[in-house]
């Protein structure tokens, strides 16, 4: 058994101990991973929205510092969600933990 199969088997056993069964395939090519990541981050809409507000209200420095400050907060949220999802993995981990941690009115 190679390392990849051992890791997948260990993950399946962990999911089984949590009462879940692995249902999704976990073999993606590099181009598939890039496509998923690119579609999730929404690169083009985010750049256009930054340009629309930042150019008239501060130009280059506003875009640079705005990106840096926002990145710190976005990364902290992402790392927190990743830590929760890795502690108790589920199918659609981000959606599960977002629903579990959000208030009832949202």
Image (cartoon, rainbow, N blue to C red):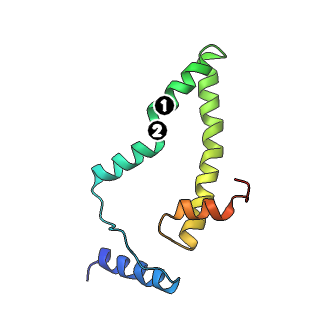
The local crowd at label 2, few if under 14, some if 14 to 19, many if 20 or more residues have their Cα within 10 Å, is few
Marks 2/1: CA–CA distance: 6 Å
Of residues 30 and 102, which is closer to you in this image? Answer: 102
The residue that label 1 is drawn on is: 45
The local crowd at label 1, few if under 14, some if 14 to 19, many if 20 or more residues have their Cα within 10 Å, is few
The residue that label 2 is drawn on is: 42
The quarter holding residue 62 reads top right
Task: Name the residue rendered at 59%, 33% in the picture.
Answer: 67
Of residues 68 and 19, which is closer to you in this image? Answer: 19
14 is higher (above) or lower (below) than 60 = below
Task: Name the residue rendered at 56%, 74% in the picture.
Answer: 88
Residue found at the far front of this picture: 105
Percent coordinates x, y for residue 17 in the rendering: 50, 86
| Label 2 residue SS | loop
Percent coordinates x, y for residue 7 in the rendering: 37, 77
Q: Quadrant of the N terminus?
A: bottom left
104 is higher (above) or lower (below) than 41 = below
7 is higher (above) or lower (below) than 72 = below
């Amino acid at each position: 058994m190679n390392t990849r199969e051992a890791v997948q088997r260990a993950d399946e056993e962990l999911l089984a101990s949590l009462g879940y069964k692995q249902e999704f395939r976990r073999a993606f090519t590099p181009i598939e991973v890039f496509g998923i990541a690119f579609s999730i981050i929404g690169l083009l809409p985010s750049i256009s929205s930054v340009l629309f507000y930042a150019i008239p209200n501060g130009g280059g420095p506003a875009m640079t510092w705005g990106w840096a400050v926002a990145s710190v907060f976005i990364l902290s949220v992402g790392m927190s969600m990743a830590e929760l999802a890795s502690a108790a993995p589920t199918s659609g981990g981000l959606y599960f933990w977002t629903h579990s941690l959000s208030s009832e009115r949202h």
